[in-house]
Image (cartoon, coloured by chain):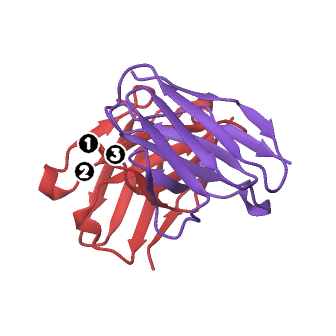
Chain colours: A purple, B red
Amino acid sequence: DIQMTQSPSSLAASVGDRVTITCRASQSISSYLNWYQQKPGKAPKVLIYTASTLQSGVPSRFSGSGSGTDFTLTISSLQPEDFATYYCQQSYSTPLTFGGGTKVEI
Amino acid sequence: ELQLVESGGGLVQPGRSLRLSCAASGFTFGDYAMSWVRQAPGKGLEWVGFIRSKAYGVTIEYAASVKGRFTISRDDSKSIAYLQMNSLKTEDTAVYYCTRGGSYYGWFDPWGQGTLVTVSS
């Protein structure tokens, strides 16, 4: 199974900050890495798919990069509505696996 | 509008069965793989399994934690996906989400609102 390791597990930031979350796969997954945002009590929603493609309707302050085993989600200027938990997920092979999540707090 | 609506969750005793349904609308259901993802209280996301479309042979894959106990199926004529859960364990307690896609090289979008399954005596 491919293990996905996110760091940090939580972070505190302020509105306007640049935030970077990393995700590392235990083996190469090419670019088959997706990022999701989840707010309390809500279903996750996809932000970025195949490492760097922004989902339609997602603000351009979100961006993704990386390939192989190391990936990054960047929020260029944190907004109040961005405080949430973020998950990475690999779709290279089954079992499909998620990272443990990164909680972004005020 | 793309929409997925789960139903069928509730409280069930260990060892019993439960069937979840996922009603889809706003897209051609038969063209897509459908997946189930769960989230235990206060925990992260765990993939349960997916069922591919007819174009890909309606193949099904499961997480090891549910293989042999859970069965995913689909009715393309009704645009509904199902998750039959047998021999339930307390560790199956979670919110279960239905989501479109999630097969190889894909992503999960959109997601249903989730339905809570509580396994307890």
Provide residue A87's location: percent of width, then percent of height.
Answer: 58, 41
Q: Secondary structure at mark 1?
A: strand
> Mark 1 — residue?
B60
Do the dots labelled 1 and 2 sit on one chain? yes
**Would you name the residue on which mark 2 appears?**
B52
Q: Is residue A48 left or right of residue B41?
A: left
Q: Secondary structure at mark 2?
A: loop
Tell whether label 2 touches label 1 (CB within 8 Å): yes
CA gap between label 3 and label 1 equals 6 Å
Quarter residue B71 falls in: top left
Nearest the viewer among B97 and B103 is B103
Name the foreground residue: B24 vs A2. A2
- Where's residue A104, x and y in %? 75, 44
Task: Pinpoint the chain carrying mark 3.
Answer: B
Image side of residue B36 versus residue A15, left or right: left
Q: Position of residue A6 (x, y in %)?
A: 60, 30
Residue B100 percent location from the top left of the image:
39, 58
Residue at 34 percent across and 45 percent down: it is: B50
Q: Amino acid at mark 3?
A: Phe
Amino acid marked by disc 1: Ile
Image quarter in which the C terminus of chain B is found: top right
Query: Label 1 near label 3: C-beta < 8 Å?
Result: yes
Q: Is residue A64 left or right of residue A15?
A: left
**Figure check: B121 above or below B52:** above
Residue B50 badge = 3
Asked whether the residues under the numbered discs 3 and 2 touch, taking CB atoms below 8 Å apart as contact, a structural biologist would say yes
